[in-house]
Image: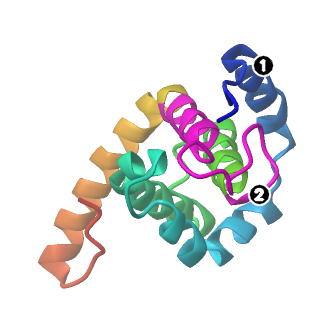
Amino acid sequence: MKNFNFDEEKLKKFVEENIPKVTEKDIQRVLDKEKELRKKFQGNTPLGQFVKDLKILFSMIKDYANGLYREIPWLSIAAIVFALLYVLSPVDFIPDFIPGVGYVDDAFVMGLVLMMIKEDLYRYREWKVQSELKNSTQGGGENIT
């Protein structure tokens, strides 16, 4: 089997250069592909370790898109959207169709973005918990945990 290592620094630079290119329209593209993305994160692949993260990321994107949560820098939303669009793309550093290694670069991008936004993610979780507590006393709310 051919060695499919990739240059992590090159991929990191690619991610950092392309995050600012994300647009508001890209948010809707990701939301429209939620089902497809959830499928990619299932199973015993490198992306499988991010299943719980995917749930909160989608919650965050939806709350941002609906105007419910705007206490997050645009670049953090753009980073999430970029990572999810990268996962969707069949053309990336390691083609997804290669068994066993096709999602390694996708997992690297997800991990990188999660590290980049960890403080914003923490603040969002705190806000979401408070919001759910408030909604539970009023009879509603989506659980992200």
Q: Is residue 86 magenta?
A: no
Q: How many marks?
A: 2
Q: Which residue is mark 2?
A: 90
For marks 2 and 1, the one nearer the N-term is 1
Above-or-below relation of 136 to 105:
below
Q: Nearer the viewer, mark 2 or mark 1?
A: 2
Describe the colour scheme in one phrase: rainbow
Query: Percent position (x, y) of residue 113?
Result: 57, 34
Residue appearing at x 80%, y 28% in the figure: 14
Disc 1 secondary structure class = helix
Left-right relation of 52 to 130: right
Q: Residue at x 82, y 51 (%)?
A: 91
Instruction: Count neighbours of disc 2 (C-alpha within 10 A) and say few if under 14, some if 14 to 19, many if 20 or more.
Output: some
Q: In the current view of this chain or complex, which residue is farthest to the bottom? A: 139
Tell whether 140 sits left or right of 91: left
Task: Give the structural element (helix, strand or loop) at label 2.
Answer: loop
Quarter of the image where the C terminus is located = bottom left
Bounds of the magenta segment: 88-114
**Quadrant that contains the N terminus:** top right
Q: Residues within 10 Å of mark 1 (few under 14, many from 20)?
A: few
Residue 96 in the image, given as x and y percentages of width and height: 68, 53
Label 2 is placed on what type of residue?
Answer: Pro
Q: CA gap, disc 2 to disc 1?
A: 18 Å
State the mark number for residue 112.
Answer: none
Q: Camera-side residue: 21 or 8? A: 8
Image mark for residue 10: 1
